[in-house]
């Protein structure tokens, strides 16, 4: 709906503003010319869309310009939206409840927004009328446990937690048992983001997985990497490492409201083909939104959502 498009537009303000600044208001109605095409190319590279996507967008706009030398900026924007939607076909994760509890393991390095995202996701599921428990399994970092407890209290979310330094796999086990006993729909596990070495971290994640599988061989059904959108293309390498070790099933891209490099989300999808379930567009609990390729593409190019007679875009 239009309100959801506005969430994307507001959340991607810095990326949109950076593109607008470099293209000097091209999408406001200017005619396309050689200079504006160069401006657009620079803007797309700066926003981290990468060579492949930037080339596709420009090639299609140039082809349209050759056919119609009177081509306007808004028409070019519409072409850009079409290309992005095509590139992102299949990128939208569709979250469905399976066995009770269905387990989502939240994975990622410290600073990615993993713990905050765990709480926001629980809040969203609860708002959708589903029942959820969160497990504070980042027991190596005192701040993470306290942070999740604080969020849980604020948002009235059930939580299973232990003391700093506790066995994180044991916390996950207890949380699954609690979720099962209470008939809850979801268990969201906040995992550690950093240990002494990368191998130690991967071993800890594997241990949590093994322990959960003692309760349910299919758990965790979802293994999502939370990546900081402001890292741009660097987040791709991070995702590759976790994917090789843990077999990721989805991504959550955070902090897109704080960066002008919002194009990185396209590169992540092109490289890894791991579906994007949610994106973080602000600090508030409701600013975690399901990823929509259409709303994202329209927001990037400043193309207002078109409402159908049914009120959808």
Image (tube, rainbow, N blue to C red):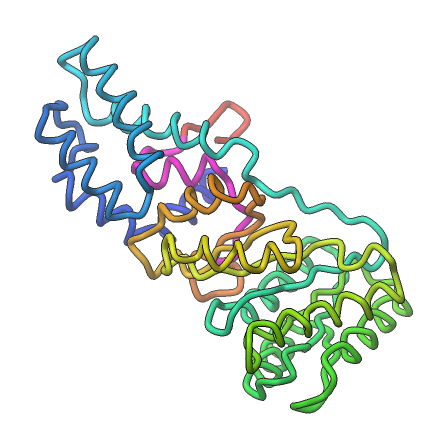
Can residue 137 be seen here? The reply is: yes
Estimate the x, y position of residue 214 in percent, counting from the top left: 89, 66
215 versus 48 height, above or below: below
Along the viewing direction, whichever of 169 and 262 lies nearer the viewer? 169
Q: Residue furthest top?
A: 67
The quadrant in which residue 175 appears is bottom right
State yes or no: residue 144 in magenta. no
- Above or below 224: residue 194: below
Q: Exactly how many numbered labels are in the figure?
A: 0
- Look at the image and give the residue range highlighted in magenta: 287-305
Residue at 41% from the left image edge and 47% from the top image edge:
8
Give the side of residue 36 with respect to residue 10, left or right.
left
> Taking 213 as reference, is 64 left or right?
left
Residue 113 point in image, percent of width and height: 49, 68
- Residue at horizontal 57 percent and vertical 34 percent from the top: 90
Q: Residue at x 61, y 85 (%)?
A: 140
Q: Is 119 in front, or is 263?
A: 263
Give the residue displayed 10% in from the left and 25% down from the top. 34
Instruction: Choose between 87 and 79: the one closer to the eye.
Output: 87
Q: Is residue 260 above or below residue 38?
A: below
On screen, 61 above or below 95?
A: above
Answer with left or right where residue 104 lies relative to residue 273.
right
Residue 291 part of the magenta-drawn span: yes
Whole-percent x and y of residue 185? 80, 58
| Residue 75 visible in the current orientation | no
x and y percent of residue 51 in the render? 31, 38
């Amino acid at each position: 709906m239009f309100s959801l498009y506005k969430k994307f537009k507001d959340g991607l303000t810095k990326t949109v503003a950076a593109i607008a600044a470099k293209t000097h208001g091209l999408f406001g109605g200017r005619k396309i010319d050689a200079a504006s095409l160069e401006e657009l190319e620079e803007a797309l590279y700066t926003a981290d869309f990468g060579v492949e996507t930037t080339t596709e967008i420009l090639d299609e706009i140039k082809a349209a310009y050759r056919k119609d030398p009177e081509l306007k900026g808004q028409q070019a924007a519409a072409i850009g939206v079409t290309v992005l939607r095509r590139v992102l076909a299949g990128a939208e994760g569709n979250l469905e409840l399976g066995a009770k509890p269905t387990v989502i393991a939240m994975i990622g390095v410290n600073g990615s927004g993993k713990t905050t995202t765990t709480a926001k996701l629980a809040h969203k599921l609860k708002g959708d009328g589903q029942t959820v428990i969160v497990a504070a399994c980042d027991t190596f970092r005192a701040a993470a446990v306290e942070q999740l407890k604080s969020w849980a209290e604020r948002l009235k979310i059930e939580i299973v937690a232990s003391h700093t330094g506790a066995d994180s796999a044991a916390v996950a086990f207890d949380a699954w048992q609690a979720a099962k006993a209470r008939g809850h729909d979801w268990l969201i596990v906040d995992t550690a983001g950093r240990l002494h070495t990368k191998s130690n971290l991967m071993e800890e994640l594997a241990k949590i997985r093994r322990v959960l599988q003692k309760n349910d061989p299919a758990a965790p059904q979802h293994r999502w990497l939370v990546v900081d959108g402001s890292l741009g293309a660097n987040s791709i390498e991070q995702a590759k490492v976790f994917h090789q070790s843990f077999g990721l099933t989805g991504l959550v891209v955070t902090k897109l409201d704080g960066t002008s490099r919002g194009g990185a989300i396209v590169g992540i999808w092109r490289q890894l083909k791991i579906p994007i379930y949610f994106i973080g567009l602000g600090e508030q609990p409701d600013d975690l939104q399901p990823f929509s390729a259409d709303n994202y593409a329209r927001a990037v190019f400043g193309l207002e959502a078109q409402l159908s007679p049914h009120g959808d875009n």
